[in-house]
Image (cartoon, helix red, strand yellow):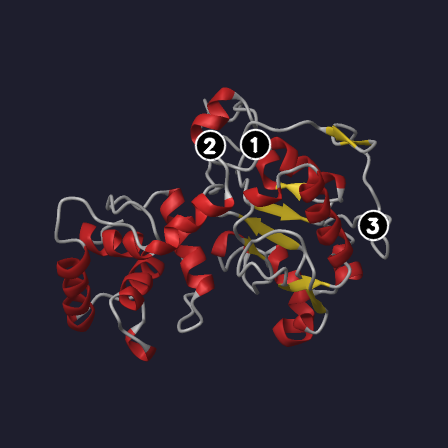
Amino acid sequence: MKLPDYIIQVAQHAAGEEPTGNADARTMAALREYDHEHDEFDCASDGERLIVSVAQHAAGLSGKDIDGRMGPTTEAAVRAYVAKHLGGTTATRPAFHTRMAVYRAPGANAAPGLLKDGIDLRDPSMIVPDGGLAEIPTRKTMKGVYGDADALGKEAMQARLATLTGLPGRFNKGDGVLHGVHRLAGPHLRLALELCARFGVIDEIYRIGTYNHRHMRHDPSMPLSFHAYGVGLDVNPRENFAWVPGASEKQVAPFSDAWRQKYPRGVSEALVLCFKKAGYGWGGDWPGFRDPMHFELVR
């Protein structure tokens, strides 16, 4: 990216990341989360425009001034932010970032027992929740089950979504409420979280992202994401950022020593197995594009 380092640093600082000036995968995941959490602006793009948009918002701009483009107004506002917050050699992270320390225990990769109350998480068979799908649809059949998000459009697709209440855990606002879940996926998500609570890994989760009417990998040339159907989830995106492994990295197995070096505070194996037990597929299993934040109710 050709943006000045200080623009990236301001965006990183606002999103609770170390202001290194390097727009790596973890930074971009944090910026997308920042975008989702602030309703005052909505940046549909990834890359440079997302970075600039977050920096503009952090610097106090609003409305049409948050356009993801560099200019005199943006430069003046961002430089003022730098002088106020990044004047020293070491920047102080905003208080938002400390939320992780509340919700996560160190060494979450070290999974607890996988057998409890007669439930063996290592058994690949699915538990069918009450009112749930006995068979999870495939990519070919999902539009007939969940609805065709392309044909229905955003508003009609949203009419098929539900709000779940009384969920275990302290993610998002900590009120046990999660919006934007397809009504057919609701029983599966509730079961997954109940299993996480039973196996002692529920407090690993500090954020869950659900419905978002966007394309895969934020690329308009690709099909709509499963988030647009309300059946995709992103869990702790900052810690479980997506990446495209190189040739020598494709053999890195989830939860191996090399995996833990890449994701030192990533989700545990037990948490992943709880979601799989409830019918979810996991993006960490994809060898060509590792996306360990992502879970989807698609077979």
Give the residue type that dot 2 points to: Pro
The residue closer to the viewer here, 213 or 109, is: 109
| Residue carrying label 1 | 287
131 shown above or below 161: above
Q: Is residue 251 left or right of residue 145?
A: left
Q: Is residue 131 left or right of residue 74?
A: right
Q: Secondary structure at mark 1?
A: loop
Image position, residue 35 (x, y; %): 42, 62
Give the residue type that dot 3 points to: Pro
260 shown above or below 236: above
Q: Alpha carbon of mark 3 to alpha carbon of mark 2: how far?
A: 35 Å
| Residue carrying label 2 | 245
Q: Which quadrant of the rendered structure holds the C terminus?
A: top right
Give the residue type that dot 1 points to: Pro
| Residue carrying label 3 | 129
Q: Who's the residue at 66% across and 49% down the image?
A: 296
The residue closer to the viewer here, 160 or 44, is: 160
Q: Can residue 286 be seen here?
A: no
Image position, residue 7 (x, y; %): 22, 56
The residue closer to the viewer here, 37 or 202, is: 202
Q: Are marks 1 and 2 in contact (CB under 8 Å)?
A: yes
Q: Nearer the viewer, mark 3 or mark 1?
A: 3
